[in-house]
Image (cartoon, grey):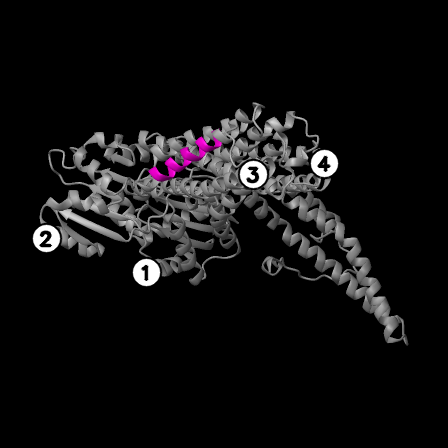
Amino acid sequence: MGIVVVGLSHKTAPVDVREKLSFPEAVVPDALKALMGYEGIKESLILSTCNRVELYTCVQESKKGVEQIKKFISDYHSLSPESLEQALYVHPDAQGVRHLFRVASSLDSMIVGEPQILGQLKDAFDIALTAKTTGAVLNKLLKKSISVAKRVRTETKIAESAVSISFAAVELAKKIFGNLEDKTVMLLGAGEMAELAARHLLKNGVKSVLVANRTFERAVELAEEFNGSAVRFEDFPSEMVMADILICSTGAQTCVVRHDVVHKALKDRRNKPIFMIDISVPRNIDPEVNKIDNVFLYDIDDLQGVVNTNIEGRAREAEKAEELIMQEVETYLQWERSLDAVPTIVELREKVEDIRRRELDKTLCQLNGITEDQRKAVEVLASAIVNKIMHAPIVVLKQAASGRDSNDLLAFGRKLFNLDKELKRPHLHEKGIGPSLKEEKK
Amino acid sequence: MNLLFFQIAVAVYVFAAVGYIVFIVKPELKWPAVAALWGALCGFVFHLAYFAFRWSESGRVPITSFFEAANFLGMGMMSVFLVMEFRFKIPALGAFMLPLVIVLMAPALVLSGDIQELNPVLKSGWLGVHTSLAALGDSAFAFAFIVSIMYLIQERQLKAKRRGALFHRLPSLDIMDTLGYRALTLGWPLFTLGMITGSIWANSAWGTYWSWDPKETWSLITWVVYLVLLHLRTIGWRGRKMALLTIFGFSFVLISFYVVSRVHIGKHLF
């Protein structure tokens, strides 16, 4: 039994290959069922996003499992096995566990730390749960990966800072104004970037929007979209009194927002701060206005600078996250190893229970005419002796199982209690006892 | 024995200050801020206990010597800090406020904490009222001073587009500007009341409301400085200029407390 991950991502395959191998959400349940039909596939889950297609499986035997999974992919997408060979990566066992934890924590994402992947993984898990193609191993593994991802997010700053221009604008606005709820944003020019930044600001609480544009119709159009109001372009200097945040992208070749205009606006605002964002190239706001108190001017390079520092910061945090994941992989593997001990412990318990019951029957038959109380006392005695004797070996087996060298001890224990029936004793009633792994886990 | 409580309080404040500083330079750790807040609370309890013991031992409000005044100023600042911390949840405040509390209380550590006999002429109900109002006013000014320093750091980072380690830890400019203003609007009336009650007390002790002793004169200057500050604020000064002015204003408080009081020529004991 082992975990195998087979797949491809933006790191190993271009988009034209990724799209050929993708599994749209609607077909995933059927694909999962088809995959389960292949030999040795015990559990499976398909994660298919625009950046990655990955099959997480629990297989009888790793090597054969990989072959079967590849066969499934080539069968399903009607591609030749050779063409797959280059694009696909294979992560067996511990590597696979680590890979999943990295994916869930967004360390393998195109933009490290972006949290969407965790949601996509949860969705994929839900689909597999509904299709009933996961079992004890993958369920545990997936739940663990989700908790690891949460740990990474809370214990490192990997997702804390903004890594896009418009998010950087929001981050800065919050550092200036705190709460954005009662703030007004003014769009000067209706460039796409400006629109995006405005959208992010709205999402973060800004309620009121003013739009000024050279073509007034476009301003009206955009204002309607934002539920704001349009302003004639010539009037923007006087309307600036209202604007706490000014986003400028007019496409003009010269300076549109002059120093004196800002100076006057600030005076009219009684020095309430203005956050000015100039996303136009060439710049439309006089760079000198940044020197005015309570004016904070950021041009496109400044914002990009913020983004770059944040990305560097994320890379540093990613290193911490990698370490954290190494630990988590180890704890998961410990749990997996402890599963090996389960059949032995079950067999041991059943064997001893068998002895207890038969010896008790025998004795009770010989003790004719005892009272009900006496009978109970004998039964209690037998159970107590068995439980007390078995306690220590079971605890030792459980503890040893989570360590690295559990196999020796397990083998020794089996031999000591004759679980593999090597010693034939005529009076020992033979009984077929199968390892009932599933019952134990409940 | 009582002094022990005072020393424990200061020691715990030092511990809390270290916790807060660790918190702002190591943002990935959350527990130092929690530990520091508990530390600050515990220290404050010891501080209160010390104040209560001293009160019962001396039989009067223990704000009559420089030692006691420094002690009470520290207590006032701590209470302002704790109220703000619980109200606004800005742990970064602690990293600036606690060191100031410790520094301002430090002179008390090296001075004799012995209870001194009070001139019977001064024994009056006004004693406690005057001194505690004045010290609470000073505490509010100290808070405004701290918030202004934090404002300037954050403003510098935003203007220069260089974001240091503190960037994420410091609150928004708006909240610091508002807190600074609120502290002034709280501190100035307290300070005013402190001066009024002081002159009433002076009248009952010496028969004159105002005698131009150094402390009185300096306090009047301080009072005017903060009045001007508040006026400028209401006509629209804010942000960096206001923060600089607030820092400037606090220097008058410091001089009043630590320089003018030490010149023993007037009637003021501290």
Main SS of residues in magenta: helix
Subunit ID for the residue under disc 1: A
Dot 4 amino acid type: Asn
Dot 2 amino acid type: Glu
Q: Residue at x 53, y 24 (%)?
A: B259
Percent across and percent down for residue A259 are 18, 33
- What is the secondary structure assignment of the residue under circle 2? helix
The residue indicated by pointer 4 is B2
Gap between marks 3 and 2, in whole Å? 75 Å
Q: Badge 1 local density, few (<14 within 10 Å), some, or many (20+)?
A: few
Dividing the picture into quarters, in which one does residue A153 lie?
top left
Disc number for residue B203 = 3
The residue indicated by pointer 2 is A217
Residue A399: in sight, yes or no? yes
Left or right? Give the position of B243 relative to A230. right
Subunit ID for the residue under disc 4: B
Magenta-tinted stretch: B218-232
Give the mark, 1 or 2, whose residue is nearer the N terminus.
1
